[in-house]
Image (spheres, grey):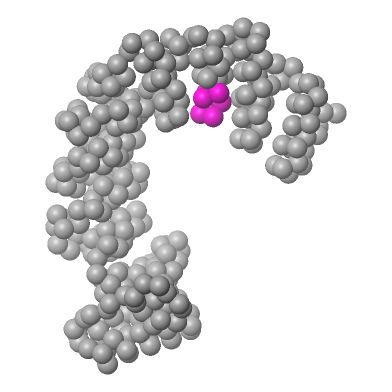
Amino acid sequence: MRRGLLDAGSRRQRRFVFDIVLAQGCLRLADLVTSAETDTDVGIRVRAAEAACREAVWTRRHDVLRRLARSARAEVRVVALTGLVRVGQDADVAAHLDDDAPLVRAVARDAARRLGIDAREHYRTAVSAGQPALGAIAGLTETGSATDAPLLRPLLSHPQHRVRAQTVRGLRLLDAVVAKEVLPLLRDPSSAVIREVTAALRPMTSALPPGLAWDLLGQRRVELRRAGYRLLRGHSIDVQLRAALMLTLDPDPRLAERGKADVTRLARDGAQTTWRRNPPPDLRVAAVQHGELAALAARAAPALGEDTSRTLSTWLARTCSGG
């Protein structure tokens, strides 16, 4: 009966029923462990893990804590490791220094500190070995500095795309990105790597080859067009508007919707049809560029809709007369 109630209904209903059953003490430790490991709802998994680990701490069931510490769910591992800390099993906790989850690594580093283990040196050794876990790369980023960047750079050519992506992310967070080193990865086969490289290069677009972003915007791969657009977003208003208009015509629906939203925002801000505390965007272009923008706006008009097209036309006309 209880099992049927726990498995039926919406997420809020299931959580409500679980809380009632838990408060009544109707769930055995084995039931809590099963729910923590297998339930599809993160809220129930966390509640079950907390209850299971609390009972395991009271009854000294270290085996249960260790089992949950190996869970595939990070939120369950954190609760289990906290339980192991409470029963004095710091060595078991410190073994999770290379975990994928940031909060798990933080708990593990705290345990390592109590054991006299230098977490930063641990991460340096792991990364230097050439086949580090993703958590080791992230851990070095969290505990290291820009002086540790030479340990990461060889991993930019690692055969696993997840390692390459995590390495680029680590270099960015350490503020140690060298544009010419990560630039070749901008056309990486992995979309995750391209995403991280784009984020790393956005603050240094002046160091990129001229025309690179526009070239990416015209590529066949969706992730390359998305990267090109992101690299153009920090430029002048006319560049942003041109890129957004081009993206509005993109064959990918999500990119096209992104371009439409940005054109709408720029046009409304420029035409001052909404109240704004900040001054309107300053669109300064020569006559030739103005004509090109107007032609792009005309091509994109069916996708933009009547209201946005009218607002954009008003802004462009005002810019032309003001120039």
Along the line of sight, the residue nearer the viewer: 271 or 129: 271
Quadrant where the image shows the N terminus? top right
Asked whether, in this view, residue 95 is left or right of residue 161, the answer is: right
Quadrant in the rendering for residue 241: bottom left
Q: Main secondary structure of the magenta part?
A: helix
Q: Quadrant of the C terminus?
A: bottom left
Outermost residue, front side: 277
Q: Residue furthest bottom?
A: 321
Q: 11 left or right of 278?
A: right
Is residue 270 placed above or below 25 in the rendered structure?
Answer: below
Q: Is residue 309 visible?
A: no
Identity of the residue drawn at 32% across and 85% down: 316
Q: Position of residue 250 (x, y in %)?
A: 38, 67
Residue 230 spot, x, y in % from top left? 31, 58
Q: On the image, which quarter does residue 216 sit in?
A: bottom left
Is 88 contained in the magenta span? no
Query: Considering only vertical position in the picture, is 243 above or below 312?
Result: above
In the image, which residues are magenta? Answer: 74-79
- Please state the total of marks drawn on the protein image: 0
Instruction: Residue at 51% x, 19% y: name it.
Output: 81
Q: Can residue 15 be seen here?
A: yes
Q: Residue at x 32, y 89 (%)?
A: 318
Quarter location, residue 31 = top right
Give residue 267's position: percent from left, percent from top: 39, 78
Q: Please indicate whether residue 134 sits to the left or right of residue 175 in the image.
A: right
Q: Residue at x 30, y 63 (%)?
A: 233
